[in-house]
């Protein structure tokens, strides 16, 4: 496994803007989607890290995640990574024995004995060029244990709407794109175009005819229109009905109520 703690960070400084609880729904999704990933203690997982990549101008998102994830694993080591030295220096006072803040980029600043179980990278790659997407993913794969995941995507400023890739690290060493997650807390209503505005970097420029994501978005818009009478029973019911309609159109959607009722539509890609 490649280590890079003493190397120059790979990447560019991003805006770093954030807000309290902006990524709460992302963390809550992980806790529901695969809580066992946070509690695994077999082999190298016993001491493997959760990495908050590009936490922003202050440490709040990393510290908020620490509080949530340690409810299921009180000993979970957490690493906040930023490419801006001033942001790291500002976060260092919040570090402790299992909470770390380090200067780094896509070449994660790990110690020799460290490994990673989960990476959260939000509102990071969206600020790069599309050509940087695959190289960034390939570099990050070097640090994650087989079976680990990365959740990477974009949210609106308050985290009420976001879309994210879930990538699974395979035994082969590469990523498998497992799912595309659409999340809303319904505070902005239910409008498919809200998701379109926060698509991850690998999709945002491909909402054009002939592309897979275009077909999906258009199919979901049709499904929402066809099931609009369900709106009379509430936005969550309408959201659920549109998801069921997508299944009838041939898309693999996770219809479990624990996700759908909370505003998470999981488009399974495998």
Image (spheres, helix red, strand yellow):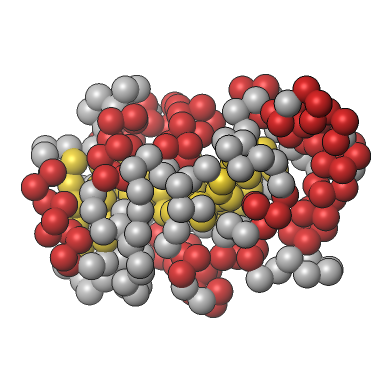
In the displayed structure image, the side of residue 166 where residue 180 appears, left or right: right
Front in this rendered view, residue 57 or 109: 57
What percent of the width, then of the height, locates residue 82? Answer: 26, 61
User: Is residue 215 among what the camera can see?
Assistant: yes
Instruction: Answer with the quarter of the image where residue 10 lies.
Output: bottom left
Q: Can residue 246 be seen in this view?
A: no
Residue at 83% across / 55% down in the picture? 218
Picture coordinates of residue 148 (x, y %)? 45, 42
Q: Which of 59 and 193 is in front in this view?
A: 193
Whether 201 is drawn above or below 34: the answer is below
The part of the image, by quadrant, that contains residue 234 is top right
- Residue pushed farthest left? 93
Answer left or right for 258 relative to 28. Answer: right
Which quarter of the rendering shows the C terminus? Answer: top right
Q: In this view, does 89 lie above or below 268?
A: below
Please give the name of the residue rendered at 31% of the width and 22% of the height, measured from the top-left corner: 71
Callout count: 0
Q: Where is residue 206 in the image (x, y as percent from the top left)?
A: 70, 68
Quadrant for the N terminus, please: bottom left
Q: Identify the residue shown where x is 66% and y is 71%.
A: 205
In the rendered view, tell whether residue 13 sits above or below residue 116.
below
Residue 36: x and y in percent read 44, 26
Is 134 positioned to the left or the right of 221 in the image?
Answer: left
Q: For the point 11% across and 39% down, which residue is it?
A: 96
């Amino acid at each position: 496994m490649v280590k890079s703690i003493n190397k120059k960070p790979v990447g560019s400084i991003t805006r770093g803007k954030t807000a309290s609880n902006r990524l709460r729904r992302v963390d809550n999704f992980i806790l529901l989607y695969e809580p066992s990933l946070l509690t695994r203690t077999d082999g190298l997982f016993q001491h493997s890290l959760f990495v908050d990549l590009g936490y922003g101008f202050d440490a709040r998102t990393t510290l908020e995640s620490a509080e949530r994830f340690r409810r299921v694993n009180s000993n979970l080591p957490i690493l906040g990574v930023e490419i801006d030295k001033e942001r790291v220096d500002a976060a260092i006072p919040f570090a402790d024995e299992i909470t770390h803040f380090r200067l780094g980029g896509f070449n994660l600043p790990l110690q020799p004995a460290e490994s990673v179980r989960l990476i959260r990278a939000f509102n990071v790659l969206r600020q790069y060029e599309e050509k940087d997407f695959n190289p960034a993913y390939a570099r990050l794969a070097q640090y994650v244990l087989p079976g680990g995941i990365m959740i990477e995507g974009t949210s609106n400023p308050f985290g009420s709407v976001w879309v994210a890739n879930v990538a699974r690290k395979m035994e082969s060493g590469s990523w498998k794109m497992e799912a595309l997650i659409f999340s809303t807390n319904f505070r902005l209503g239910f409008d498919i175009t809200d998701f379109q505005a926060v698509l991850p970097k690998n999709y945002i420029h491909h909402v054009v005819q002939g592309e897979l994501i275009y077909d999906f978005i258009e199919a979901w818009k049709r499904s929402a229109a066809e099931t609009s009478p369900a709106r009379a029973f509430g936005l969550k019911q309408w959201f659920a009905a549109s998801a069921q309609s997508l299944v009838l159109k041939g898309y693999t959607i996770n219809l479990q109520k624990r996700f759908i009722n909370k505003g998470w539509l999981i488009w399974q890609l495998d």
